[in-house]
Amino acid sequence: MADSGVVETLLQRIEKADDGVDSLNVAASLGVDHQVIVGAVKSLQALGDIISADLRSSKHWELTVEGSEIAEQGSHEARVFSSIPLEGLAQSELMKLSFGKIGFSKAMSNKWIRVDKTQEGGPRIFRAVENIEDQVREKLLQVQKGNFSQLDEKEKNELKKRKLLSEVTVKSYWITKGSSFSTTITKQETELTPEMIATGSWKEKKFKPYNFEAMGVAPDCGHLHPLMKVRTQFRQIFLEMGFTEMPTNNFIESSFWNFDSLFQPQQHPARDQHDTFFLSDPALAHEFPQDYLERVKKVHSEGGFGSQGYKYDWKIEEAQKNILRTHTTAVSARMLYKLAQQKFTPVKYFSIDRVFRNETLDATHLAEFHQIEGVVADYGLTLGDLMGILHQFFTKLGLKKWVEVGNSGVFRPEMLLPMGLPEDVSVIAWGLSLERPTMIKYGINNIRELVGHKVNLQMVYDGPICRLDS
């Protein structure tokens, strides 16, 4: 509610006026800011039809800060003229004055002064006329007094161009009596209470009209899930580094692509029922690239490509079993095999999608989570390249120091060469999780210690698909 004294005074002014009052005039007569009167008007409007207020707009000219200074002290050019004695003034001295540069230019245009460049010690300024008339100051004084009509549009625009004058739009209210006008303000009730109903006092109360057009409290809107925000951040980093996103829309995968193609033995514990979800319908996959399948079978059971293999009887029945993919590396295997079937060109792939693990549920583990994977295939890649790209990746992520947050390594020849990739092509890769950073046996921190060593890296979930070579 506005100040009660201002409200009462405003009502008294309205009562005495025949055709209404202007809020600007009321503010001026009371010596208060116009916004105080505006607040009183809005308070009265909220009480019903006590007053009627029409919003009006008007424009007028007023002096800028610089314009007010000139109205008081004179224009720059007039002050320059006054500063020049009869014997003249060195131009260098004139330019030291705050108004010297602008005033010199204007005074020269008005032909009030002249410059003698032949003087000893440099150019010297002399008066060119005996007296001057400071018309700029006179015009500004007229505006200051409210005599806007004394200036034509050209003069106003010229002063505006010099930033001495500005046009201001003023909004005010023309206030008249309303249908329920009264100089006595009665507080209106905003709600009907049980006590009013029980006692019947509501009959004597005056209630504030209900505004059916008023906006209610804005409902809380939806927000992007924190994991999706992080996913967007990771995806943007990959794209900035020139990676291409892999298609990961196949949640169901065969054991061949999920395990066998990655050189994981069929006896590995990750392939047991307590670690992996197996499908009952359809239970088996039947379409495989046969020549590639035979090479995978041979490297598992007999060895090859410099490896002695696992020396066991590899079974197609195990490779055919359909599962919910346990990692997106199965997608990487498919993409690398596809790459091997064409003329090789270096690639950089990434994926961020859902994977599934048959685990005991607890506060930090669910049956599914999102895996982040980066894969780079090129000629002659080394562990140094992996460290460099990891450094760039995690620097963009905002990590300031080495920490263990995910798997990384160089894919083994036993995985890559059966696909048909050239022998001098290496593939480096790394992976992590949105929900649960994996503290692995050989993490990023350990990679720094492994430089110069040949180490077989067994990944926590995915089996021995990586080998770190010096």
Image: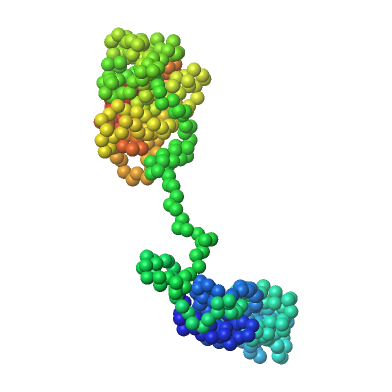
Q: Is residue 9 left or right of residue 270?
A: right
Q: Residue 414 location, x and y as percent?
A: 36, 17
Q: Is residue 305 left or right of residue 107?
A: left
35 or 316, which is in the foreground? 35
Is residue 160 among what the camera can see? Answer: yes
Q: Residue 201 location, x and y as percent?
A: 40, 72
What residue appears at the point 37 percent right and 65 percent down from the top-left corner?
194
Q: Is residue 342 left or right of residue 54?
A: left
Question: Quick one: quadrant of the N terminus?
Answer: bottom left
438 or 391, which is in the foreground? 438
Q: Is residue 224 left or right of residue 404?
A: right
Is residue 396 among what the camera can see? Answer: no
What residue appears at the point 29 percent right and 40 percent down from the top-left corner?
403
Whether residue 134 is situated above or below residue 242 in the rendered picture: below
What residue appears at the point 41 percent right and 29 percent down from the top-left corner?
375
Q: Residue 451 location, x and y as percent?
A: 30, 31
Whether residue 202 is situated above or below residue 368 in the rendered picture: below
Q: Residue 38 location, x and y as percent?
A: 53, 76
